[in-house]
């Protein structure tokens, strides 16, 4: 299928730019300003101070949620003042706590591996933030961010429908592509969303930022959801429940300190002594056990995913071929996707219609709670949350 890239903001358009203080969003705002757009900068305020701030002599990594937010906001204010850009801070603390923090804890405590960035993009950056912008009566032509992705529209209707919804396509710089995190944003929201860095390489972004003298170009790049220093503190609202670590035959290898501290595929920090390399193969929340296995036992031939979203809510009308990514860092792999028929006695409580995703080649460490995102011709055609792996 052929797709049409959607027009970018032009001179005279009013554009709201979601800013974090990082180089990508800062350069996005500058580029649009220089293009002749009326630019309005906005930053989400997430930090509520509910976790005591950790003082450390060592520099801590950049994180979305943490006390460093105040410094980021100050940098955004300074940049916008320098470039005559209107600026607002939008408070989304309550929604963030409910949609991201509580989700994050609940998923880990149920033995699943959450993806807070996907949740945040769907409900906060492209949800609560846009609601906040509307609440202060800001009207705009486009909402832009520094994500590496592209908005396209199909030339012909999807599947057997008459719809041609906005869809998300991969960016020019595949090494920085962020489409996996964006797949749940509804097509009607995407109508006004644009990603001005879609056709740029990260190296070009840094070059332009340095040339423009942007302080953001000197900031550390990696950005986690929450600093590892705060992880245990985030889970301190409930006591961890220790349990057994076992092998595939049920032999007890050691004790775990609570299943929320483990994820499928993990090797480090297991605290067991065996004479061969072992990894977390699965987590049984019902029985509070962590199962370890050799690396080759982590392969799966297929998975079942549920809680699916489709561009324009257009579901496929039969089995489809696509490429699937099972985590951000994984390469897309060819797969066949079809509706999964729930058998009598199936103990899984699926959200909506589940789908069976059968890989062309087995995949390692399929983790329930992560997302299976479907691509066709480098465009996202759907995606769901992994419910379980099939060996």
Image (cartoon, rainbow, N blue to C red):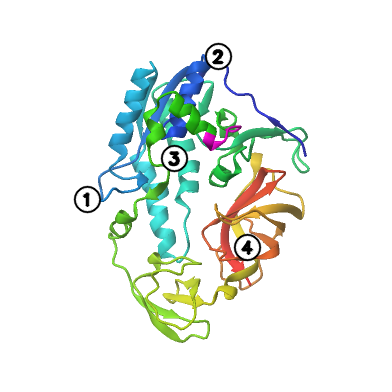
- What percent of the width, then of the height, locates residue 66? 31, 45
**Depicted 286 relative to depicted 372: above or below:** below
- Mark 3 or mark 4: name the one nearer the start of the chain: 3
Magenta segment: does it hold 121? no
Disc 2 secondary structure class: loop
- Which residue bears the numbered disc 3? 124
The dot on residue 11 is: 2
Q: Nearer the viewer, mark 3 or mark 1?
A: 1
In three-dimensional space, the C-alpha distance between marks 2 and 3, rounded to whole angstroms, equals: 28 Å
For the point 66% across and 70% down, which residue is it? Answer: 343
User: Taking the image as drawn, is residue 130 in sight?
Assistant: no
Q: Is the residue under label 1 in contact with that under label 3 (CB below 8 Å)?
A: no
Residue 90 coordinates in the image, percent (x, y): 36, 31
Looking at the image, tell me whether mark 4 or mark 2 is earlier in sequence order.
2
Quarter of the image containing the N terminus? top right
Range of magenta residues: 198-203
Q: CA distance from mark 4 to mark 2?
A: 47 Å
Q: Nearer the viewer, residue 346 or 96?
A: 96
Q: Are marks 1 and 2 in contact (CB under 8 Å)?
A: no
Q: Which residue is mark 1?
A: 57
């Amino acid at each position: 299928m052929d797709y049409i890239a959607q027009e970018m903001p032009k001179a005279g358009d009013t554009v709201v730019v979601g800013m974090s203080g990082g180089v990508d969003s800062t350069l996005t705002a500058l580029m649009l300003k220089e293009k002749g757009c009326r630019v309005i900068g906005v930053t989400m305020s997430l930090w509520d101070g509910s976790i005591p701030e950790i003082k450390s002599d060592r520099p801590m990594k950049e994180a979305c949620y943490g006390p460093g937010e105040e410094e980021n906001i100050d940098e955004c204010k300074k940049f916008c003042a320098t470039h005559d850009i209107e600026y607002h801070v939008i408070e989304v603390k309550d929604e963030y706590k409910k949609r991201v923090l509580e989700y994050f804890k609940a998923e880990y405590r149920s033995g699943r591996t959450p993806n807070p960035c996907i949740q945040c993009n769907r409900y906060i950056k492209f949800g609560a933030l846009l609601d906040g912008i509307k609440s202060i009566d800001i009207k705009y032509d486009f909402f832009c961010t520094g994500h590496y992705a592209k908005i396209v529209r199909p030339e012909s209707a999807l599947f057997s429908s008459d719809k041609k919804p906005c869809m998300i396509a991969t960016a020019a710089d595949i090494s920085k592509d962020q489409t996996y995190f964006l797949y749940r944003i509804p097509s009607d929201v995407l109508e006004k969303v644009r990603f001005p860095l879609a056709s740029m390489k990260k190296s070009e972004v840094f070059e332009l930022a340095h040339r423009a003298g942007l302080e953001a170009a000197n900031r550390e790049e990696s950005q986690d959801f929450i600093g590892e220093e705060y992880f245990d503190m985030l889970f301190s609202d409930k006591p961890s429940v220790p349990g057994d670590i076992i092998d595939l035959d049920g032999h007890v290898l050691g004790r775990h300190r609570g299943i929320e501290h483990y994820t499928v595929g993990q090797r480090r920090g297991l605290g067991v002594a065996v004479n061969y390399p072992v990894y977390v193969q699965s987590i049984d929340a019902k029985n509070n056990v962590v199962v370890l296995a050799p690396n080759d036992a982590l392969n799966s031939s297929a998975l079942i995913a549920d809680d699916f979203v489709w561009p324009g809510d257009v579901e496929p009308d039969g089995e489809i071929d696509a490429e699937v990514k099972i985590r951000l860092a994984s390469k897309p792999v060819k797969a066949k996707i079809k509706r999964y028929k729930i058998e009598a006695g199936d103990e899984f409580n699926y959200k909506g219609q589940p789908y069976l995703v059968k890989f062309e080649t087995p995949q390692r460490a399929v983790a329930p709670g992560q997302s299976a995102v479907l691509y066709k011709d480098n465009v996202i055609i759907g995606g769901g949350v992994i419910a379980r792996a099939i060996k």
